[in-house]
């Protein structure tokens, strides 16, 4: 092993420097744990070892990144003694700065219960005040002593144990040198990537439990500063939120003279009582989020090329919402909205990628006594959605790439059909009627490259012999591959429902099926012009199937994806609270005025609002807006001048919801 992998002084030195750093970072983490051990309750002990393991991987990534200056230095043509002096000086200085940052991190956590992040930069705006606060609050002489002590210890360790390796020569064959260098490069890349799975190690993996302390323990503060840098500035305006509070509160059902109405503290919390009879029955809930399933692409939405026979059949046995809209066109943003009941209006990346808003209330967390599942064919690291799920939903069982027996077919993991079969197997395994569950199943196969695996039970891929390319393009599909991928997704849904109908728990289960978003149609559709942005992007079907609890039919009221979780809570009969935009679709209190808020996060950024009669659209940067009366004989006409009061009403509400959404993303901590 010595000759094969450590047969050059450079490699011996680099491995020694990695070990030196890992010992130091592990020591810092253990000191952090020991100092703040009171934050760790016995109930959260099972998460401790996983937190330490994740912390080790984050520390290894930092060690590999900080190895780069050494790799450059030892390959510069200069005398060995000069290299040693440079490395000793540079890494002693670097370790002194690192020690200072780790101590700052401990003080930051003691004060704010958060690990060091990019918001610390704001304190530099008033350096004298910040310095005085530190001087008067913390034992700064002790900190200076510790920094000096650790820095001196680092110099001693470097000069005695690490850099002498540069002078220790070993002979070896050319083959052994190639092997040793290749091994090092592989381990270096693996250390930075941090994972053997498709997606790299991300900050969201630290938030693998609802326990704040173990999640914080997992983080590496230096990397976390970098991860949060692009989110360092809050983009909400509290003054604007106060201005629109009365209007938004009324829309959300907060009565002006009621106990919940509080414009001073910007209270948006509403509490809803339990339905004792329904709650006693503990209905199961299965939610299917179907990839890119636009309303216009389905049979119930008017497609004549039969892409969704199983969905169409299920809709006939269920309550179909024909005017159901997602807040925007992006899967990560849609899943965030479905879970939190808030629109992800983040302008920098997405809400699920923002560490500062990972703490979100969701009504799923209020399903006490329920076994909870999340199924995805690929990796939950996609879009950093893992953090939003595991941090906010207690005892959530996550099944993802690597959890299944089925083979991975492409970048999106296992096929949708295998996802449905395997998720059904997990749910049905030993299931008794008395053991309620909640399951969220998210398909992902209806994506390019539209892979159709060979093993698909009796599903038949259609070719040009069966249907022409022109025919499917007329109904919004790019190609036969696109068309067949949607058919396979639909077939997978039908397979799950057919299997579920044979179980004992089917009768006591509520199934919800909806698309995460739609996609713009490439072909000419028979769609009204005013409706195109919604039809092609936001308009998706919602099906609620439960013969025991929901009467079949067609519902034309305006509905939003943000209404899903409050509706589930209402159907399950549980008492629940929310600050969100979501409103129970079966609560008649809201039927006097329902509207769906949507937005485009790509240029040009715009806001949209659709109610039963009008469609409103507004572009903030240039102040241009329009309104269409989509129930009139001229639905494409901009009637802004004809209905000025209606235009103003919808403009004010859309802007109010937008400002409030920005605020609530940062003020929606879970309440259970």
Image (cartoon, grey):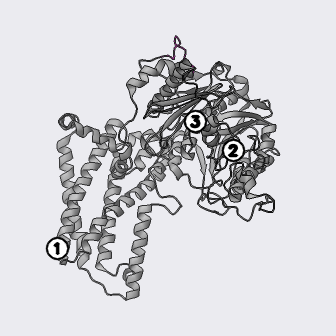
Q: Is label 1 in a helix, a strand or a loop?
A: helix
Does residue 402 lie above or below 385 as drawn?
below
Mark 3–mark 2 distance (CA, rounded to whole Å): 41 Å
The residue tagged 3 is 365
The residue nearer to you, when weighing 191 against 299, is 299
379 within the magenta span: no
Image location (x, y in percent) of residue 467 = 79, 57
In the rendered structure, does residue 260 fall within the stretch colored magenta?
Answer: yes
How many other residues sit within 10 Å of disc 2, few (<14), some (14-19) or many (≥20)?
Answer: some
Nearer to us in this view, 18 or 485: 485
Distance (Cα) linking label 3 and label 1: 60 Å
Mark in front: 3 vs 2: 2
Q: Residue at x 29, y 73 (%)?
A: 13
Q: Nearer the viewer, residue 244 or 528?
A: 528
**Label 2–label 1 contact, CB within 8 A:** no
Image check: 498 left or right of 524? right
Q: Earlier in the sequence, mark 2 or mark 1?
A: 1
Q: Give the image location of residue 383, x and y in percent.
A: 51, 49
Q: Does the CB distance between marks 3 and 2 fall below 8 Å?
A: no
- Can residue 583 be seen? no
Describe the element under mark 3 as helix, strand or loop. helix
Q: Is disc 2 placed on a helix, strand or loop? A: loop
Cα separation between marks 2 and 1: 72 Å
Q: Disc 1 marks which residue?
A: 82
Quadrant in which the N terminus is drawn: bottom left
Identify the main secondary structure in magenta: loop
Residue 146, horizontal then vertical, whole percent: 21, 50
**In the rendered image, the vertical position of residue 512 relative to residue 594, given as above or below:** below
Q: Residue under circle 2? A: 525
Local packing at callout 3 (Cα closer than 10 Å; few below 14, some 14-19, many 20+) is many
């Amino acid at each position: 092993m010595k000759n094969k992998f450590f047969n050059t002084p450079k490699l011996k030195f680099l491995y020694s420097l990695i070990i030196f750093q890992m010992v130091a970072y592990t020591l810092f983490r253990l000191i952090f744990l020991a100092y703040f051990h009171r934050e760790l309750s016995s109930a959260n002990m099972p998460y401790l070892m996983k937190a330490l393991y994740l912390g080790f991987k984050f520390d290894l990534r930092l060690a590999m990144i900080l190895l780069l200056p050494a790799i450059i230095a030892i390959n510069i043509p200069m005398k060995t003694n000069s290299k040693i002096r440079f490395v000793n000086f540079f890494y002693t200085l670097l370790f002194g700065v690192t020690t200072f940052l780790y101590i700052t991190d401990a003080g930051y956590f003691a004060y704010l219960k958060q690990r060091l992040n990019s918001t610390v930069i704001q304190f530099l705006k008033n350096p004298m005040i910040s310095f005085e606060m530190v001087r008067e609050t913390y034992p700064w002489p002790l900190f200076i002593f510790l920094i000096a002590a650790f820095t001196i210890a680092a110099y001693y360790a470097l000069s005695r144990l690490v850099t002498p390796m540069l002078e220790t020569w070993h002979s070896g064959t050319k083959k052994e040198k190639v092997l040793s260098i290749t091994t090092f490069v592989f381990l270096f890349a693996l250390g930075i990537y941090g994972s053997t799975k498709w997606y790299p190690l991300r900050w969201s993996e630290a938030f693998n439990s609802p326990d704040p302390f173990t999640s914080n323990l997992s983080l590496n503060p230096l990397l976390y500063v970098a991860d949060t840098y692009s989110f360092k500035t809050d983009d909400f305006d509290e003054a604007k939120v106060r201005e629109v509070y009365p209007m938004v509160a009324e829309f959300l059902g907060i009565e002006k003279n009621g106990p919940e109405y509080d414009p001073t503290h910007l209270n948006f919390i509403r509490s809803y009582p339990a339905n004792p009879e329904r709650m006693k029955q503990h209905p199961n809930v299965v939610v299917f989020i179907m990839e890119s399933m636009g309303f216009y692409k389905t049979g119930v939405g008017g497609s004549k090329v039969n892409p969704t026979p199983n969905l169409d059949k299920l809709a006939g046995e269920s309550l179909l919402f024909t005017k159901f809209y997602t807040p925007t066109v992006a899967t990560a943003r849609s899943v965030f909205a479905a879970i939190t009941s808030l629109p992800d209006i983040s302008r920098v990346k997405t809400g699920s990628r923002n560490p500062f808003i990972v703490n979100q209330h969701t009504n799923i967390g209020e399903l006490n006594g329920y076994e909870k599942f999340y199924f995805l064919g690929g990796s939950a690291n996609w879009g950093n959605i893992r953090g939003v799920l595991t941090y906010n939903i207690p005892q959530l069982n996550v099944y993802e790439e690597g959890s299944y027996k089925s083979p991975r077919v492409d970048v999106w993991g296992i096929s949708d059909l295998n996802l449905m079969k395997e998720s059904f197997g997990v749910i049905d395994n030993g299931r008794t009627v008395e053991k309620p569950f909640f399951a969220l199943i998210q398909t992902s196969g209806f994506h390019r490259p539209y892979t159709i695996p060979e093993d698909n039970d009796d599903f038949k891929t259609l070719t040009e012999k069966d249907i022409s390319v022109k025919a499917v393009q007329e109904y919004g599909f790019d190609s036969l591959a696109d068309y067949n991928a949607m058919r396979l997704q639909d077939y997978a849904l039908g397979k799950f429902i057919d299997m579920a109908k044979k179980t004992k728990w089917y009768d006591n289960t509520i199934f919800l099926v909806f698309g995460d978003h739609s996609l713009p149609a490439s072909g000419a559709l028979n769609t009204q012009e005013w409706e195109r942005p919604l039809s092609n992007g936001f308009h998706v079907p919602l099906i609620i199937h439960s013969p025991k609890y929901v009467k079949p039919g067609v519902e034309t009221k305006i509905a939003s994806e943000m209404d899903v979780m409050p509706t589930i809570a209402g159907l399950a009969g549980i008492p629940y609270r929310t600050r969100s935009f979501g409103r129970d679709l079966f609560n008649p209190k809201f039927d006097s005025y329902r509207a769906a808020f949507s937005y485009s996060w790509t240029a040009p950024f715009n806001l949209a609002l659709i109610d039963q009669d009008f469609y409103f659209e507004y572009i903030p940067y240039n102040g241009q807006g329009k309104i269409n009366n989509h129930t009139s004989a001229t639905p494409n006409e901009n009637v802004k001048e004809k209905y000025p009061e209606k235009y103003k009403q919808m403009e004010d509400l859309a802007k109010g919801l937008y400002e409030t959404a920005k605020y609530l993303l940062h003020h929606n901590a879970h309440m259970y």
